[in-house]
Image (cartoon, rainbow, N blue to C red):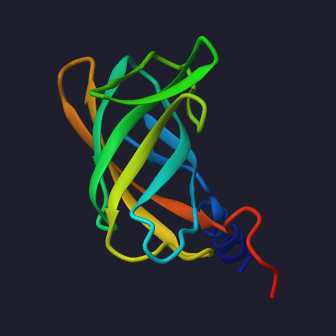
């Protein structure tokens, strides 16, 4: 009976883990914000770590028509967002996907994103040995900032 409780505790801990592991890739804290009706884009943020050199080469989501890798830069007091083709993932270095740097942009949202829901994502990664790895992630939809209180 004790083994059963230990197994149950281990299973519960694994199910409550917020990180996603695939091959040598770890994705943590995937999140986006709720959207309003008519809003067609959403940004997704997360951290990603690879045990070996790799490259994030793309993404997709059933929640949108497209998913693009973007980089926000600051030059001469101006912010500029541009689409990029890939993001290097150095071995054992955490790469942060944030609003002020690399991030993922979902365009052509099929329905508004509602707080408390999740958005499915597939990250396409090319490993150093040229293997392609797909990592399935669920991004948590957080409430809108400054949303009216009911």
> Residue at position x 70%, y 69% from top?
9
Q: How many marks?
A: 0
Residue 130 as seen in the image, left or right of residue 31 = left
Residue 33 as seen in the image, left or right of residue 68 = right
Q: Nearer the viewer, residue 40 or 20?
A: 40
Task: Please state the horizontal and vertical placement of residue 107, each as a whole percent of the image.
Answer: 33, 56
Query: In this view, which residue lies farthest toward the front?
Result: 77
Query: In this view, which residue lies farthest toward the bottom?
Result: 150
Task: Report the quarter where the N terminus lies.
Answer: bottom right
| Residue 15: quadrant of the picture | bottom right
Task: Please state the horizontal and vertical placement of residue 103, each as a whole percent of the image.
Answer: 48, 38
Query: In this view, which residue lies farthest toward the top?
Result: 76
Task: Please state the horizontal and vertical placement of residue 67, each as a whole percent of the image.
Answer: 31, 49
> Residue at position x 34%, y 68% from top?
63
| Residue 70: quadrant of the picture | top left
28 vs 131: above or below: below
Residue 24 as seen in the image, left or right of residue 110 = right
> Residue at position x 80%, y 88% from top?
150
Q: Nearer the viewer, residue 54 or 74?
A: 74
> Residue at position x 26%, y 39% from top?
133
Q: Nearer the viewer, residue 28 or 85?
A: 85
Task: Please state the horizontal and vertical placement of residue 11, each as a whole percent of the image.
Answer: 60, 68
Q: Nearer the viewer, residue 17 or 79?
A: 79
| Residue 131: quadrant of the picture | top left
Residue 144 as seen in the image, left or right of residue 121 = right
């Amino acid at each position: 009976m004790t083994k059963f409780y230990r197994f149950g505790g281990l299973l519960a801990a694994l199910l409550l883990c917020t990180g996603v592991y695939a091959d040598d890739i770890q994705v943590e804290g995937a999140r986006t914000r709720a959207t309003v009706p008519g809003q067609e884009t959403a940004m997704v943020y997360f951290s990603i770590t690879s045990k070996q050199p790799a490259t994030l080469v793309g993404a997709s989501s059933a929640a949108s028509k497209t998913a693009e890798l973007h980089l926000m830069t600051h030059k001469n007091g101006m912010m500029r967002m541009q689409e990029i083709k890939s993001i290097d993932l150095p071995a054992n270095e955490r790469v942060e996907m944030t609003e002020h740097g690399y991030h993922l942009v979902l365009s052509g949202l099929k329905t508004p994103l509602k707080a408390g829901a999740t958005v499915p994502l597939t990250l396409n990664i090319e490993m150093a040995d040229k293997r392609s790895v797909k990592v399935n992630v669920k991004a948590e939809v957080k409430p809108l900032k400054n949303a009216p209180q009911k």
